[in-house]
């Protein structure tokens, strides 16, 4: 019998000696996995966005540390070599805190001076992976409870199985709500410039037989005005102590529009996405990617009068969010209540 938690689409697969990474840059035209055997490769896979999405980045980095340990142990100073690889992995992308959370966990295990470090690091990396899938299933149920009889939602970017260990955060909620039979349609923003919605989300939903309707990002206000959606459901890359949420660029615009149109905003994210060390979203480092992702080639020469600014995340203030859903429970109106109740769990 198939495992109900086994997913049709897997971004990452641990093979015992290598990490298989689905190259998400090629989807939906091509399904191709690359095998990585060292931390250099995993760093490159994250930086180049072969693997992307906050929880998936964290899981990949955990396996990257494991691969580093497998490469260097038991040579002299192997722990120093692994620490250097951890630093390199940490520099791959700045905004998703799950990366630093996973690296911290692996580093703590590394410093335990265990009798069998490879076995212990393997166990931990696999635990991080499995825990993320379990968290997504729990969030799916909590989020579906909140959606109730909502008939249609809008999602942004890709916060699905592709962005996580499996099942997804926002798409986990959508999967669970769809199974309950009420949710009839999922609108997906294209999510420029990288097109996570157009290339990944609608593909992933279709794999699971969930109807999806793609819209241009600029159509979101009109969609809300039409009364076709009850909720916006998104994931997160970092949530600060006051409940501010960093997520894919465009999330803030959606939240502002949602307020104008009486649409509610749900953020689904595992506990690994919380950064209680930051008081508010003002302190989150927002990644800016290469202007090449936006500009036509003719504008890329030195001295061009046309340049581009390409921040790939933004911060939605807590007051614009109706519910934050985690595996530890739900915070309704985080702008009023904060998210501190989760920290003490
Ligand atoms: O640049 P990306 O594709 O890594 O950005 C991904 C997002 O913004 C997701 O919404 C977020 O990581 C949550 S994924 C569960």
Image (cartoon, helix red, strand yellow):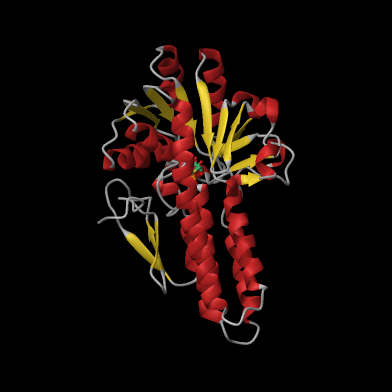
Q: In percent of the image, x 59 and y 49: which residue is there?
A: 272
Q: Nearer the viewer, residue 288 or 134?
A: 134
Q: Nearer the viewer, residue 306 or 91?
A: 91
Q: In percent of the image, x 33 and y 42: which residue is there?
A: 204
For the image, the number of numbered tags is 0
Task: State left or right for residue 9 relative to residue 290.
Answer: left
Give percent across and percent down for residue 154.
42, 27
Give percent across and percent down for residue 288.
58, 44
Give percent across and percent down for residue 246.
60, 38
Q: Nearer the viewer, residue 262 or 327?
A: 327
Give percent across and percent down for residue 314.
59, 35
Of the 4 image quadrants, the one containing the C terminus is: top right
Q: Is residue 43 visible?
A: no
Q: In percent of the image, x 59 and y 69: which residue is there?
A: 85
Task: State left or right for residue 157 relative to residue 321.
Answer: left
Q: Is residue 216 visible?
A: yes
Q: In percent of the image, x 64 and y 71: which residue is there?
A: 83
């Amino acid at each position: 019998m198939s495992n109900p938690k086994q997913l049709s689409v897997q971004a990452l697969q641990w093979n015992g000696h290598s990490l298989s990474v689905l190259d998400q840059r090629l989807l939906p035209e091509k399904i191709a996995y690359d095998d990585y055997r060292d931390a250099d490769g995993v760093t490159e896979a994250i930086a180049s966005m072969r693997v992307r999405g906050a929880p998936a980045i964290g899981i990949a980095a955990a396996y990257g540390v494991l691969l580093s340990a497998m490469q260097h142990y038991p040579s002299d100073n192997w722990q120093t070599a692994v620490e250097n690889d951890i630093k390199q992995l940490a520099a791959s992308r700045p905004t998703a805190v799950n990366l630093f959370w996973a690296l911290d966990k692996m580093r703590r295990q590394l410093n335990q001076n265990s009798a069998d470090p490879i076995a212990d690091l393997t166990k931990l990396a696999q635990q991080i992976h499995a825990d993320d899938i379990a968290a997504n299933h729990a969030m799916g149920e909590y989020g579906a409870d909140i959606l109730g009889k909502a008939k249609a939602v809008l999602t942004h970017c890709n916060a699905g199985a592709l962005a996580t260990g499996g099942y997804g955060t926002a798409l986990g909620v959508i999967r669970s709500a769809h199974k309950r039979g009420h949710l009839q349609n999922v609108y997906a923003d294209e999510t420029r410039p990288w097109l996570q919605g157009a290339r990944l989300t609608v593909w992933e939903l279709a794999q699971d037989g969930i109807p999806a309707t793609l819209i241009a990002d600029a159509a979101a206000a009109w969609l809300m005005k039409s009364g076709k959606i009850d909720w916006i459901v998104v994931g997160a890359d970092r949530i600060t102590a006051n409940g501010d949420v960093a997520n894919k660029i465009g999330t803030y615009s959606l939240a502002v529009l949602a307020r104008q149109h009486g649409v509610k905003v749900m953020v689904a994210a595992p506990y690994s996405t919380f950064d209680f060390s930051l008081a508010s979203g003002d302190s989150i480092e927002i990644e800016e990617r290469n202007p090449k992702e936006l500009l036509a080639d003719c504008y890329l020469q030195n001295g061009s009068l046309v340049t581009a600014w390409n921040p790939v995340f933004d911060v939605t203030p807590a007051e614009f969010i109706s519910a934050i859903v985690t595996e530890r429970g739900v915070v309704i109106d985080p702008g009023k209540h904060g998210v501190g109740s989760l920290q003490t769990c």
